[in-house]
Every structure is written in structure tokens, then in C-alpha cells.
Image (cartoon, rainbow, N blue to C red):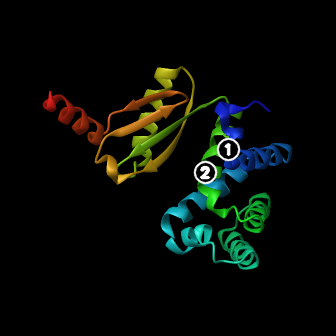
Amino acid sequence: MENSGGIQASLSGRYATALFDLARDSKAIDSVGKSLDSLKEALAASTDFASLTTNPLVSRSAASAAVAALAKSMKLDGLTANFLGVLAQNRRLGELGAIIRAYGALAAAHRGEATAEVTSAHPLDTKQIAALGAQLKAKVGRDVAVNQTVDPAILGGLVVKIGSQMIDSSIKTRLNTLATAMKG
């Protein structure tokens, strides 16, 4: 397996690589990806779930039971459900967001796509993501998977990172640049 942009170097990268290897061997890359997308949405939507992943006071057995129930109620594929159990037992649920991002990058590389990490002040709708993906495809010359993060602190605009390239058109950066220019 190639080291896709240094993903394997981090703890979350090693977990994502292990999950990806299992998914590839089981021919379940897409079903695991869909389950992870559902988990990403649940992390963003549920403060209880987000708290479960980061609370050090939750015991391993309680975390394992909670993620098993969550996996069943969300109808996650078996590989992802088992993986969540491993994360709970190893006290690594806090890495889940980073693991999901790293898995997405590995799956995109496997499909021959580039991965763009896009940060916006507000969630982008599917039309906006499709248009952005088309523009990025024209720029890099291959399909681009868009991994979106919302950060209201950028105020507006986008920050797009593809590999080592970063395009920062956020209002926050523009205001900081203007403030620096005005200082002389």
C-alpha cells in the first residue's frame, strides 16, 4: 500500500489504513465509506455522540456497548461496527473524525481521485460541492473528492487544500491581509 500523502504517519492514519486494508480485502471500500459518512454526520449532529467519543470518564465497556448500539441503530456495515468496537476498547474514539478523513483520502486515492479538504463558513449544498469539484477537476486534471469541513471563524469564502497546495480565499484571511497593509 502506498503512503498516500503521509497518512500512515499519524495514529489516526494507521487506524484508517488498517480499516482501508480490511475493506479492500473484503471488497467493501464503498460500504465502509458510506458507513463512515453516516458516522461523520452523526458526530456533527449529535452532541451526545461527540461527547461519547471524547469523554475520558466513559469506561471501555460502556463505550463499546454504546457504539455497538449506535452501529446497530444506524445500520452500519459489519466491518465498520467491529472497527468502532476496537476504537472503543483501545480508547481511540476521539480519533474518529481524523480516521474518517484519512479513510476518505485513501479511498479517493484508490479510485484515482485527488482529495480536496475544503473549509467553508457554512455547509455547502450538493450543487455547490459538484460545481467546486468540477472546477478543481479542471485545475488538477483528475476527479476530485471533496471533504468538507465547516468553520464559522473564516467568516466566508473557502479554504481549499489539495495535497501540498492551498488556496485561501476566506474573508478572515482577506481582512487580516488588509489590516496588515493598512499598518504600513
In space, the residues marked 1 and 2 are separated at their CA atoms by 10 Å
Considering only order in the chain, which callout, 2 or 1, is on the residue closer to the N terminus? 1
Vertical placement of 39 versus 49: above or below?
above
The residue at the point 49 percent across, 66 percent down is 45
Query: How many other residues sit within 10 Å of disc 2, few (<14), some (14-19) or many (≥20)?
Result: some
In this picture, residue 50 sits left or right of residue 76: left
Q: Residue at x 65, y 53 (%)?
A: 34
Residue named by callout 2:
98
Amino acid type at circle 2 is: Ala
Q: Quadrant of the N terminus?
A: top right
Decide: marks 1, 2 in contact (CB < 8 A)? yes
How far from the left and from the top, in percent, is residue 9? 70, 39
* Marking on residue 10: 1
Foreground of the two, 115 or 178: 178
In this view, the residue farthest toward the right is 25
Q: Is residue 46 above or below residue 171?
A: below
Outermost residue toward the front in this view: 184
Q: Residue 173, position in %: x, y?
A: 29, 37
Tag 1, which secondary structure? loop
Estimate how packed mark 1 is, as few (under 14), some (14 to 19) or many (20 or more) residues with alpha carbons within 10 Å.
Answer: few
Which label sits in the foreground, 1 or 2? 1
